[in-house]
Amino acid sequence: MPTAEEITKHHEPAPDRNPWVNGPPAPTPIVIVDYDERWPRLFDVIAQKIRAALGDAALAIEHVGSTSVKGLPAKPTIDVDVTVADPADELAYVPALSSIGFTLVVREPDWHEHRCLRLAEPSSNVHIFGPDCPEVIRHRMFRQWLTDHPEDLERYRRAKLAAAAEISAGSGVMMEYNKRKEPVIRAIYERMFRANGLIR
């Protein structure tokens, strides 16, 4: 089980690190839509695809990110956390997922051996982590916190819409969008961690 320090540590990627397997994606507009009641069902479809491809190699499959929180606007892309025994062992899961349409796009050995694969339809990002990964725990906690705390859900909703609006006239680079949301996200995480006794 990760320590409190590991769970509360924010990821700070090295500025010179290039995680892109086939180069960074082309800039696209950031489109935020209202919560869609279909998103849980789309997650079920994606989870079934992953389970059929990986079988018992998928130790856990979870719906995370904004589309997993009822009432929260989001980009219409389903985020999924998949736990495998060893994310560094790409042969154990990448070929099977590639055979059903997933593409490996990100490799981050220095961040819990994170890998990300994308599927075009239903649009999804599948994040691969190992057992007891602090980031997976953070994702679960954040999903539950927003579900249980409508005031922070509203704060995050406003931050997402404002960030998207601020860059709507530009290229819509995802990293810029995420950076604009970050202060609100960090503040919510701090309240969540304090409430759970992980920081003082």
Image: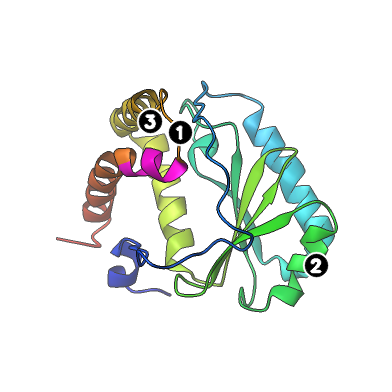
Circle 3 is placed at which residue position? 160
For the stretch drawn in magenta, what is the main secondary structure? helix
Rate crowding at label 1 as few (under 14), some (14 to 19) or many (20 or more) other CA atoms within 10 Å.
Answer: many
- Circle 3 sits in a helix, a strand or a loop, which is it? helix
User: Which region of the structure is painted magenta?
Assistant: 174-179
Q: Is residue 175 magenta?
A: yes
Which quadrant of the rendered structure holds the C terminus?
Answer: bottom left
* Disc on res. 95: 2
Q: Position of residue 7 (x, y in %)?
A: 35, 65
Q: Is residue 158 above or below residue 136?
A: above
Q: Is residue 192 above or below residue 87?
A: above
| Residue visible at 76% across and 55% down in the picture | 50
Q: Is residue 199 above or below residue 180?
A: below
* Disc on res. 172: 1
Query: Is there CB contact under 8 Å for labels 1 and 2?
Result: no
Mark closer to the observer (3, 1): 1
| Residue visible at 61% across and 63% down in the picture | 21
Rounded to the nearest angstrom, the CA distance separating label 3 from label 1 is 13 Å
Q: Earlier in the sequence, mark 3 or mark 1?
A: 3
